[in-house]
Image (cartoon, rainbow, N blue to C red):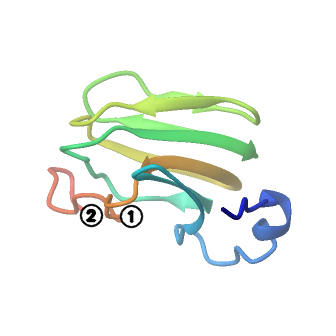
Amino acid sequence: MKITKVSPKEISKRLNKPWTPLKLLNVNDHVVRMALFKGEYHWHVHRGEDELFYVLKGEVKIRVKEGEDVVLGEGEMVVVPRGVEHAPVSEEGALVLMFEPEALKSRGDENASGGG
């Protein structure tokens, strides 16, 4: 069995288009993805799975439709539970790792109330 080493720092150099995640690694039926968050992402909800965000660099606000927004700095993480409508925002730009089921659509549910 081959063990693969990944350098998020090196891979981050390939991220030039915001909100376009790159797959880094598979973990069982989950995947670790990395994306450049810059500007505002659309409101969406994942009905069948939780989503973990870990900020490597920068700051991200996770807006929550029915709840309190969460601001994450470097080295901080949060799990957005399934069924929670949310919209990430990063004014200055941030590098973020996401841990989620591989089957998760990276654009979320665009039919959620609040638009897409």
Res 84 label? none
**Residue 64 in view (yes/no):** yes
Q: Callout 2, which amino acid? A: Gly
Q: Which residue in the structure is indicated by mark 2?
A: 116
Rounded to the nearest angstrom, the CA distance separating label 1 from label 2 is: 13 Å
Position above or below: 91 against 50: below
The local crowd at label 2, few if under 14, some if 14 to 19, many if 20 or more residues have their Cα within 10 Å, is some
Helix, strand or loop at mark 2: loop
Q: Is residue 108 left or right of residue 47?
A: right
Q: What residue sits 75% from the left and 45% below the top? A: 56
Q: As displayed, is residue 45 above or below residue 103?
A: above
Q: Position of residue 9 (x, y in %)?
A: 84, 60
Residue 92 occupies which quadrant of the picture? bottom right
Which image quarter: residue 34?
A: bottom right
Q: Which mark is residue 106?
A: 1
Q: Are marks 1 and 2 in contact (CB under 8 Å)?
A: no
Within 10 Å of the Cα at label 1, are there few (<14), some (14-19), or many (20+) other Cα atoms? Answer: few
